[in-house]
Image (cartoon, grey):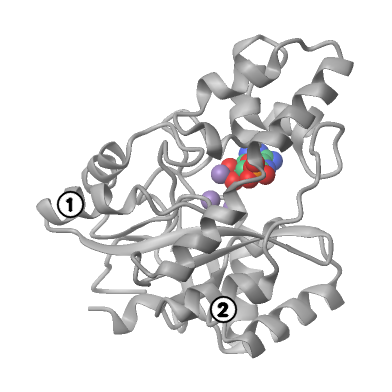
Amino acid sequence: MSGNFLNVDLHCHSTRSDGVLEPSQVAERAYANGVRMWALTDHDELSGLSEAREQAESRGMCFINGVEISTTWSSVTVHIVGLNFDAQHPALRDNLAGLRAGRLARAQRIASVLKDQGIERAYEGALAFAANPAMVSRTHFARFLVQEGHCANLSQAFDRWLADGKPASVPMQWATLEQAVEWILAAGGQAVIAHPGRYKYTELQFQTLFDYFKQLGGVGIEVLTGSHSEQDYKTYTQVARRYGFLVSCGSDFHGPNEGRVDLGRLPPLPSGLKPIWNDWW
Ligand code: AMP
Ligand code: MN
Ligand code: MN
Ligand code: MN
């Protein structure tokens, strides 16, 4: 985008899922970093939205309701970002509550794998990092492993134990792609494939995913995200053009000392793409 650059960040996390800042602190940081259109997108969780909205609007930011829904498609975890929906929609709220319910049991399984590898008390350790215990995630285990000196940073914790396919990843059956898109659309929102560059699919699987997602009513993909390389920016710019997807962008900020990209610090969108927020303001 050239000329009238609007700083938009439509993907980030608070303590309501696996971020380290409270929703109000994320709002404050987003504003300080120049973000003027902002969505909080906690994993499978809407409880931070009212605080985030209040803080954002008091600073004159345009706030968009967001969520990042965990799905499993073709045995891989795919994250679907929902944007601009009614956060009070009863079915969306109930379905997300159901999706969150398996996390504590899974955390026990992760801890037992780590115990087999000689790492004690990981369940208690991970929970100590989770402000909302029901939302305990691999990220909280990674923070525990760093704190205990088992590895130097989060990325090493994932590479050694927690990433998909590694010993302590403990696969989950999340929502189906159909369910996630349906829940978002029923609540009046728009569905976006988060960080497509992270999924380990073949070319044919990607094509099938994009076609099927469109068929279900999904409208967008993230092109600019903290998880994408410069090459991914190019690849998904082409994908957005080819499939006619609207384009979203978000830092995927989790905390001040984590991740590659801070809130509001993504480059401008490549020209010729249709931003998902064009019709919102
Ligand atoms: P979960 O929802 O418990 O499976 O945890 C997934 C979360 O782990 C994601 O939302 C990311 O925040 C984080 N994550 C996944 N893979 C990595 C990685 N390779 N490096 C750092 N964080 C990761
Ligand atoms: Mn996360
Ligand atoms: Mn994600
Ligand atoms: Mn995310």
- The amino acid pointed to by label 2 is Glu
Q: In the rendered view, does 54 fall on the left or right side of 277?
A: left
Q: Residue at x 52, y 53 (%)?
A: 97
Q: Is residue 35 above or below residue 249?
A: above
Q: x, y percentage for residue 32?
A: 22, 43
Label 1 Cα neighbours within 10 Å, binned few <14 / some 14-19 / many ≥20 = some
Under mark 1, the amino acid is Glu
Q: Which residue is mark 1?
A: 54
Q: At x 15% / y 56%, what residue is drawn?
A: 57
SS at badge 2: helix
Position of residue 170 measured from the top left corner of the image (x, y, whole percent) = 81, 39
Q: Decide if residue 16 is on the left or right side of residue 233.
A: left
Relative to 25, is 230 on the left or the right?
right
How far apart marks 1 and 2 lie (CA) works out to 28 Å
User: Where 206 falls versus 229 (above or below)?
Assistant: below
Q: Residue at x 65, y 79 (%)?
A: 239
Please give the label number shown on residue 182: 2
Quarter containing ligand 1?
A: top right
